[in-house]
Amino acid sequence: MGFLAQVNLADIVFLKSVFQLEHLPAVEYPEIAFAGRSNVGKSSLINRLVNRKALVKVSARPGKTQSLNFFLVGQALYLVDLPGYGYARVSQEMQARWQGLITGYLETRKTLRGVVVIIDVRHAPKPQDLEVISWLRERGIFFIAVYTKTDKLSGNELSKQVVILDRGLGVSASERVLFSSKTGIGREKLLECLDSFFL
Ligand SMILES: Nc1nc2c(ncn2[C@@H]2O[C@H](COP(=O)(O)OP(=O)(O)O)[C@@H](O)[C@H]2O)c(=O)[nH]1
Ligand SMILES: [Mg+2]
């Protein structure tokens, strides 16, 4: 049985928001981080994963989460909601600061097991997503790509988009999961993939 199967996902509590690396919680539990462009559906995905409707605030206004948000799950695991990247309507200085916070965290965090990179399945491959995936690869950080909002496409459109994204992002079928926070499709598969972070 995998690590996650033994964790009570429904037992999730918000711990803290971190705006500076100095304020990270003590390294106590293994961690899974969630990254993605603003408004991609990151918060919705985390809520679906733990099957809670509104634990993580779902926002119609993008670019709001500027902090690393730590959630403690089953007294055994941290889920870390990273600030959304690529939100154009903040200053360059702000973007640089966010990026520093995210990369600083990902590069130094000893307890980080892996990163979930969330991508809107409807969109063309974005340079920033490619950048993040290459960056994680270069550093040997485990990741799984999640193509979310699949409920918004028909079967045909979906198959076409998946091929385009796989090619554009250089991701293989075993490195990504098709997901919908609305229907819950892909949840079990994603949990399996996350479990492989703990092998
Ligand atoms: N139809 C559909 N809508 C989604 C899905 N995931 C997120 N959304 C919607 O996309 C918007 C942004 O979601 P949110 O989780 O706040 O994105 P975040 O900014 O990345 O955390 C909200 O209006 C969500 O209801 C999904 O899988 N299917
Ligand atoms: Mg969010």
Image (cartoon, rainbow, N blue to C red):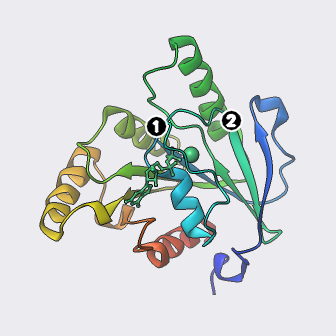
Does the residue at mark 1 contact the one at mark 2 (Cβ under 8 Å)?
Answer: no
Give the distance between the C-alpha atoms of the residues marked 1 and 2, in whole angstroms: 20 Å
Please identify the quadrant where the C terminus is shown. Answer: bottom right
Q: Is mark 1 within 8 Å of ligand 1?
A: no
Observer-nearest residue: 126 or 91?
91
Q: Residue 51: x percent and y percent?
A: 60, 73
Identified by mark 2, the residue type is Ser
Q: Residues within 10 Å of mark 1 (few under 14, many from 20)?
A: few
Observer-nearest residue: 61 or 49?
61
Please identify the quadrant where the N terminus is shown. Answer: bottom right
Quadrant of the rendered image containing residue 156:
bottom left
Identified by mark 1, the residue type is Trp
Observer-nearest residue: 189 or 183?
183
Quadrant of the rendered image containing residue 173:
bottom left
Tell me what residue is drawn at x 44 percent, y 51 percent. Answer: 118
Q: Is residue 188 above or below residue 135?
A: below
Precedes in sequence: disc 1 or disc 2: 2
Q: Which residue is mark 2?
A: 67
- Residue 53 vs residue 9: left or right? left
Q: Which residue is mark 1?
A: 135
Tell me what residue is drawn at x 73 percent, y 60 percent. Answer: 30
Q: Residue 24: x percent and y percent?
A: 81, 39
- Residue 192 vs residue 72: left or right? left
